[in-house]
Image (spheres, grey):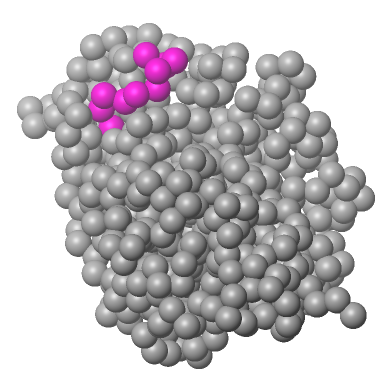
Amino acid sequence: MSSNRINKQYDISHSLGQVALGAEPADMVVTNGTLVNVYTGELIGHTDIAIKHGRIAYVGQATHTIGANTQVIDAAGRYISPGLLDGHMHVESTMLSVTEFSKAALAKGTTAIFMDPHEIANVFGTEGVRLMHEEGRGLPLKVYTTFPSCVPSTTDLEDAGAELHVADIAEGMTWDGVAGLGEVMNFPGVVHGEPKMTGEIKATMQSGKAVTGHFPSDDEAELQAYIAAGVTSCHETVTREQGLAKLRLGMHLMIREGSAWHDVKEVIKVVTEDHVRTDNIMLVTDDVYPETLVDKGHLNHVVRRAIEEGVDPVTAIQMGTINTARYFKLDGDIGGIAPGKCADLLLIDDLRDMEPSTVITNGELVYSGGELLAQFPSYVYPEKIRQSVHIAKPLTAADFLLPSRSQGTSTKVHLIQAIENSARTAKAVATLRVSEGMIQPDPGQDIVQIACIERHHGTGQISLAFAQGFQLKRGAVASTVAHDSHNLLVMGTNADDMAVAANELARLGGGMIAVEDGKILASVPMVIAGLMSDQPLETVTREVKQLAAAWKQLGCPLNAPFMTFSLIALPVIPDIRISNRGLVDVTGFKLIPVEIVEG
């Protein structure tokens, strides 16, 4: 049984009642577990759970519900927890299809997600959102969608593959399984009443659904204006003080622990030190990469981190289950273990470890003994989605040479300085050599050439600039994961390798690649919109590890450098970025020349 075929409680309520009374046998009974009761905060020993038609019929001593054909699962003293719910995440960040991600997530105890597919929306608009949404509706994992709100992130400084308007959001709110509006990143637009943002929030509120937020500022007046506009949650909280401010104003606080952003340690202090009520606190992942899924887990890792920081295990589980369900107004179906709820259960040996040994969704055994038991339907994206890299012509080394307007042998340039483990960049100035009229990169100064190539419409538009901080000594790298517009991003020490990297990535249909002396060291093909692989988790994890090793071979010592690289084209986070239109001064919200010519 899959999420788009959940039996409605009102259609089977009589049968559930008959099971509770012992007049009908249950389909499945889980026996002799310690119930994690997220409603009362109790641990209740020697508890059985009787299940009928995918929903819970009885909680307690359920021997009277067992018939001749009832499947009985002995919890053998294990804990019985509700399935975990991730209230904010981007499937595209896992580099996996929704189907392949769901296999990894279910094995780690996540039984429902609220995905914001704004990456594919920047490439294919509503069509891309619908395809990911539809893929998710056919899976044992419950996949709810928050409809992307800020596509593109800016219309003045870059060119994305698509744009979403208020009418698109209004239509999206009518889709079955859309639970709200995706993170509203354009908080200045909300605060200052831009018609597009105001219209999107109004359409969402009129549909009775959640408006999820993204508010990184410390400005108290702007925060209150943002909340007053209708935004009800935020996952972009990095300090205890920010968390307290939001909670005191009635906002729902999403505490994030992903692969790059580790916010639990600091923000969870609102619970462990300030002892606030936890009803309005959720745990989320935001962005998780394949290796994290394999090595650490999914939402179970976030719950575990909260417990490690001193949160009571039952409280931590509440923040990853019932609180999320209530926020999205879905607690009638998910988030807890009680009569009438969907039978999404985890059997866990140790609550502090949070590794499920058995996972049940909709009353079906989907994971047990280290094996996935569920059937996952195949989902093939249309050829159009798999052919999303459109460059005007094969690129040559000449396309990556930047002519100087200076007559001398050197010139000054604006520089993008990358910062390890940070989404921000710094603006700098450097002096570079000019040879045969072309400005030269200088690996000795840790300065490499960077290019952003429009890849959605085949316009042939290429912008060139220089970056520092990656410590590349040789070769080139490229990526079609380039937030948020996802054009083709190339960086290298020489133009020849840059051309090889760009052309090969276009041939593959997108992804990430590393090249040295014309030879491909590693690649991660991502044929789904140039953002996601169609391969299994094990394959993608292996490819990503090989890519990380290739970056190191080229001289880069940074942690997950391709992730920092993918943000170099995001012109809404200070200080300086590259887009397909040129070099962007984010603080001035304008394009600036690469070369600084005096006079």
| Place of residue 92 in the rendered image (x, y in percent of width and height, measured from the top left) | 43, 57
Quick one: 264 or 468, which is closer to the camera? 468
Seen at 40% across and 37% down, the residue is 292
Residue 545 higher or lower than 592, as above or below: above
Q: Residue at x 36, y 85 (%)?
A: 394
Q: Residue furthest front?
A: 409
Q: Main secondary structure of the magenta part?
A: loop
457 vs 147, nearest the viewer = 457
**Residue 360 point in image, percent of width and height:** 28, 35
Q: Position of residue 177 (x, y in %)?
A: 45, 60
Q: Residue at x 54, y 27 (%)?
A: 318
Read off the magenta span: 350-359
> Can see residue 79?
yes
Report the label total. Answer: 0
> Looking at the image, is 18 positioned above or below residue 75?
below
Residue extending farthest to the left is: 68
Spot occupied by residue 582 in the image (x, y as percentages of width and height):
66, 77
> Against 478, is 452 above or below?
below
Quarter of the rendering occupied by the C terminus:
bottom right
Assess whether residue 103 is covered by the magenta stretch.
Answer: no
| Residue located 19% across and 29% down the image | 370
- The reply, left or right, for residue 274 in relation to residue 337 is right
Most foreground residue, 158 or 352: 158
62 w.r.t. 281: above or below: above
